Image (cartoon, rainbow, N blue to C red):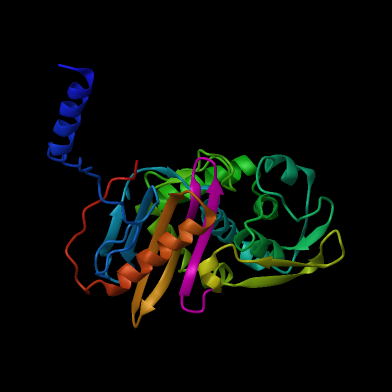
Amino acid sequence: MSVGLVGLVVWSSLVGAPPRAAKTRTSKPPVSHRQPDDPSAPPRIGARAATVVDLTTGEVLYARAATEPHAIASISKLMAMRVAWKRGLGAKLAESTTMARVDADTTWGGARSRLIIGREYLNKDLLHAALLGSDNRAVVALGRAVGLEPDAFAQAMTAEAKALGLAHTRFVDPTGIDHGNQSTPAELVELLRVTLTTMELANVTRTAKHLTSAKERSGRPLLYRNTNALVHDPARKVLTGKTGFNSKAGWCVAFAAEIGPNRRVAVIVLGTKSKHLRFADAKRLLNYAANRKSKPAPPQDEPAPE
């Protein structure tokens, strides 16, 4: 057979051959990050540990790793101010405390302080600096004001936790800088509950901003704004709370809020990946709690995300 004839035969076979079926690719459906359409369904959150508890009935409305110890960072300051208050701080708010070198040395490695060594500050202003601005020097200075040096202060905080029945809560330093300060979401609910029994402290923690009688280095008035963004949200009625962050704890917030007539809940969010995500998780949990029935079925404790 000639070369031309061979080519013609091959061409004819190709033209006449039925077309090959196209390969179909199977792909997984995209992961959705949208919240469930059902407002009563548990929300998707990024926190490593969290819980929501009805403070009136004691019902646990949501739980994720709620009984596991977790670093709590500056949420520690709620216990610090409780201990200081029980040591007589309330009677000393009109007095002044001088910022000392030990206050700076003890809090080295924490967030920058706006309090200046050698200057006097009203204890009332230091209380707001500690609970609104989360100023570490303010906490140590107030400890000295009631006769507690840093180590003794932390020991008194741990002793108070044990007196309250908080078996997994302990403190290595009074500010939350140390990664050894830890508690569980369930036990932090109890810390919020007892904070509400001291109205003066609860009032400070839900204050949006406080103008002190002191000045900054620039000469401008020293103003503290609450680090808890929910306090600044007019749609939320926060009763008390505190934020926290360090590299071990992640971004955290613990607070109590009113979500309806005679309905108060405690919300704990620990270990989110950013400042804003902790509040996003908190809002989802608040909305979820508001949409739950009055007597929900006991929830299962969700595992922490990997």
Q: Which residues are magenta?
A: 233-253
Which image quarter is the C terminus in? top left
Residue sitting at the far bottom: 261
For the point 45% across and 50% down, the residue is 272
Which image quarter is the N terminus in? top left
Q: Is residue 234 magenta?
A: yes
Which x, y percent locates residue 143?
65, 52
For the point 51% across and 69% down, the residue is 230
In screen coordinates, is 30 left or right of 199? left
Q: How many marks?
A: 0
Q: Is residue 218 magenta?
A: no
Which x, y percent locates residue 88?
61, 61
**Which residue is nearer to you in this view: 280 or 120?**
280
Which x, y percent locates residue 127?
65, 63
Which x, y percent locates residue 169?
43, 46
Residue sitting at the far top: 1
* Among the 4 quarters of the image, the one containing residue 14: top left
**Whether residue 202 is visible:** no
Q: Is residue 109 above or below residue 193?
A: above
Name the dominant secondary structure of the magenta segment: strand
* Among the 4 quarters of the image, the one containing residue 285: bottom left
**Whether residue 70 is visible:** yes
For the point 66% across and 51% down, the residue is 136
In screen coordinates, is 304 left or right of 117? left
